[in-house]
Amino acid sequence: MSEAAPAGPDDLVLCHQEPIRVPGSIQPHGALLTLDGTPCVVRRASANVAALIGITTDEALGSPLSALLEAPAVAMIEQAVGALDADVDERATQTFVLDLDVQGTRRRFDAALYRSGTERVLELDGARDADRPDDERASAEATSVSSLRALVQRLHGARGLAAMCETIVGEVRTLTGFDRVMVYRFHPDGHGEVVAESVIDTWSPYLGLHYPESDIPEQARELYRLNWTRCIAEVPYVPVPILPADAPALDLSLSQLRSVSPIHIEYLVNMGVGASMSISLLDGGRLWGLIACHHGQPRPVPADTRAACELLGTTFSLLLPSLEATAEATAAAELRDVERRLLTEMADAEPLADGTFIHLPNLNELVAADGVASVSGRETQRIGLSPDDGALLAFAAWLDDHVEDDVFASASIADVYPAASDWPDAIAGVLVIEISRARGQYLMAFRQAQETHVRWAGRPDEKPVVAAESGGRRLSPRRSFATWNESVKGVSLPWQAIELRCAETLRRATLTMIVGRAEEVSRLARELERSREHLHAFAHIAAHDLKEPLRGIGNYTTFLAEDLGDVLDADARRKIDTILRLADRGSALADALLEVAEIGGADRHPEPFALDEVVDAVIEMFAPELERRAVDIRVARPLPTLVGDRSQLEQAIANLVGNAIKYNDGADPWIEIAAEPLAVRPEDRSADWIEEHPLDRRSHVIRVSDNGIGIPEKQHDDVFRLFKRLHEREGYGGGSGIGLTIVKRIVELQGGQVSIAATPGGGTTFRFGYGDPPDRAPDRAPVRAPDRAPDRAPD
Amino acid sequence: MNTNRGPGDMDGGTTPATAERPTVLLLVEDSLEDAEAMRRAFERCGVVPSSVIHCRTVEEVMEYLERRGPHAARADIQLPRLMILDLNMPGLDGKELLRRIKGTEAWRAMPVVVFTSSTRKVDIDECYRLGANSYMAKPQNFDDLLTLAERTKRYWFDTVLTPVIKR
């Protein structure tokens, strides 16, 4: 077990404070000298100069270069110094190959010369036998101009960012021979994700893993921006101090040999890494990501290979803006496609159910969410993870008062809306699209907190990521994960700019659709009104004009019969009678047509009236018949007060009572009239309930029952058809066959329905819904007060 | 005496009154068939055919009332005792004629019975507002027409007193 204290925020702070620019030491695979003045005098030397170039630090410190090295080497160095001194770029680096005599053998080094403060720093690494150049062939071949050109062209040829990342990891791996090469991309919130990887078969892939922001501290990122490449040739290593130790700290920002943070070494050791290299990927001046290379064994990278990697990194970086612009343009084009498709879909869609203003899956398509919901007044719809209906409505009410943005997004909604901490499923991120504040219409997308969502590297249950701890460390990635995990609890992945734009687009599309639909509805209403008037006028004129010739036929046939008088025999008289009867019937049908048309033409002026009075009027109308047939008329008084068109209802009841009298040849005829209020209040009726109780869209159900001849069930639908008669023309007192059609029209004009049932024991029972519910709201949502709190929730 | 009395006058004794003051029924009807049926019906209930004037258009009615055109030489000095007016006519319709008659001082007192196939509430309402003295729906068969003609004749010519309107 580790003897270290448990990692906590202190460790993380410590990590941020690490002096990684001025470590005071270098990695052991190279040597470092600082040179001052002209000609050059050595001021500092790494403790390993004796081992690498055969000069002790005691000899070196304070000595002129010419006293330490042979003349050709000194001349070469002085030449580079001259070039460096002439370069106005403070961060310029001169690189060259330097051959030195080291204890009798010719050694070749990769030399780098750069400035640090007032001193010049000479770094020598890649030591090899100068007389055996075979070693260099492979890398020389790989880094030849023609090879590099081909490589750059392959990068150029990659179609899109993802393809370029794929290409570059393969190329870098081939070039360097590392076991694992990854493109590690920084997200806007600072955390990183492995987006491309090339790795040897025996290692577990890291592709798709996310790393918390704290894994790469800010000052490390700054160094990544300054240096295109960084190498750690051997992990772990013993750092080599730069002497004299008491000199002011030397800034090694530009160093290739710089000793890295022990925490970072620990990190690499934990991952089983023996050597690493990283290549910076910049987008403009911003650190976009890294190409991170790991090797199982120690692996120094030759200078020419590093230079090739740097070329790849810069090429990638140069291509990035255009690729991102292309990606953005593609995304924008896709967005337009989505918008177009959404509009088309919405336009083609069946009219949406009441309160529904959008097909929710559309939102899910546009933003990556764990759930989506819509709120419209008191109505909600939910797909996937979402707070329950009550919580949604409460949240919508909060939005009404606190959010003025058309599109509002938060990755940790509980920060501004504490009630959200009770939401289920660790929902933390919310994106809200306001459709209509006045109607309380919102679209919402929900995201869970990150810890439930992302494959985090360093997560304890993901073994391949981190090797077992070997103890003795102050801070390890696994522990940093635990710390970090606490810090992001209740925070979702951030909503991306593109997603907010999508949301804005969806909002526009939805509003356009709603406005369009409203216009369409009012246009249809106008058209309907016009065609209703036309139809009414047409029926009227048709019926009227039809009657004139029918009248003529009747009259002239009568004249004929009168004028011919005696001449006509019985057969002729029968034929004349038939003509007269047909003319009468034609007239009656035209009259019926007029009557039906009249109902549609009448404007509704709903007003309250007493149903008792209506029934009284009907009974009075039929008094002679009721008396003659000794009909027992039973009325369940007191009848309620209804809201509707009184005269139309009177006509409907009269038609039903008239039928009930007419179609009853029993000995003790009776008719029952009753009205029952509905037990379930209109606003409490669910869609399903209304489906099952169509009559009950109205305030009351009116029932007219009789014990007459009844209607066979299979003809229950037929009786409402225009001019449909169930009995022979002269049976049951004749009739035009429109009575029930008129009842149905009157009831349906009011939004109700008529049903027929057999009366128990024989006869017919008609039921129909009638009466406007007194508390029927004019709109789905109450009108909200215009004044609201001006405060605005933070994004 | 400034009132018309019909064939069944109570105080006029028997028929001679008709001879000096012929019953004039002005029938305004664009349909020749309907007009013939009405003539026949009124004749059947005792109205002398020659005392019935038939006009087919508003213009003809105006010519008659103003004694123009074919009516220029007419000698009678009284307006018809009753006008029976169809609403639906080509050109100016019955309502327009009704409006003119009831809007003209000289003609206003003449009883007008609207006789039409329209039973629309708006038509009934409008005609009475314009000053119609009665409104009747045209029956579809002759028997009913006969009944209506009989009642009309009995009411307007035998029951009520109507003004004598000098031209």
Image: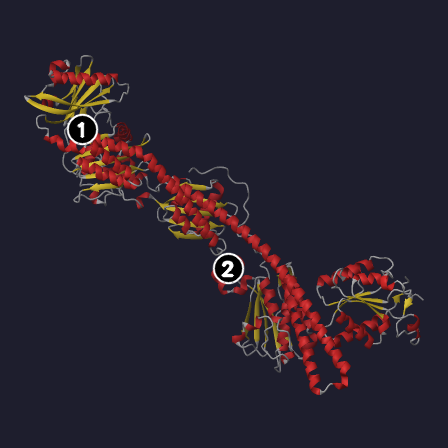
Where is residue A191, by image quadrant?
top left
Q: Is residue A127 left or right of residue A119?
A: left
Residue annotated with mark 2: A685
- Colouring used for the render: secondary structure
x and y percent of residue A152 in the render? 25, 35
In this rendered view, identify the residue nearer to me: A376 or A749: A749
Question: Given this view, does label 2 or label 1 mark the residue nearer the observer?
Answer: 1
Instruction: Examine the rendered structure and indicate whether residue A245 appears above or below residue A221.
Output: above
Residue A308 in view: yes
**Residue at the extreme top of the image, as rendered:** A38
Please tell me which residue is depicted at 15% across the width and 19% down the height of the picture.
A45
Mark 2 Cα-neighbour bin, 10 Å: few <14, some 14–19, many ≥20 = some
The chain ID associated with circle 1 is A
Secondary element under disc 1, as helix, strand or loop, is helix
Q: In which image quadrant can residue A573 be found?
A: bottom right
Residue B54: x %, y % from top left: 81, 68
- Residue A241 is tagged as none
Considering only vertical position in the picture, is B110 above or below A502?
A: below
At 25% from the left and 41% from the top, the residue drawn is A166
Three-letter code for the amino acid on which mark 2 is drawn: Arg
Q: Which mark is residue A303?
A: 1
Question: Image height check: is A140 above or below A340?
Answer: above
Q: Is residue A394 above or below residue A731?
A: above
Q: Is residue A237 left or right of residue A287?
A: left
* Label located before the other in sequence (2 or 1): 1
**Residue in the picture at 75% in, 75% down:** B144
Residue A381: image x %, image y %? 44, 53
Q: Position of residue A686 (x, y in %)?
A: 48, 59
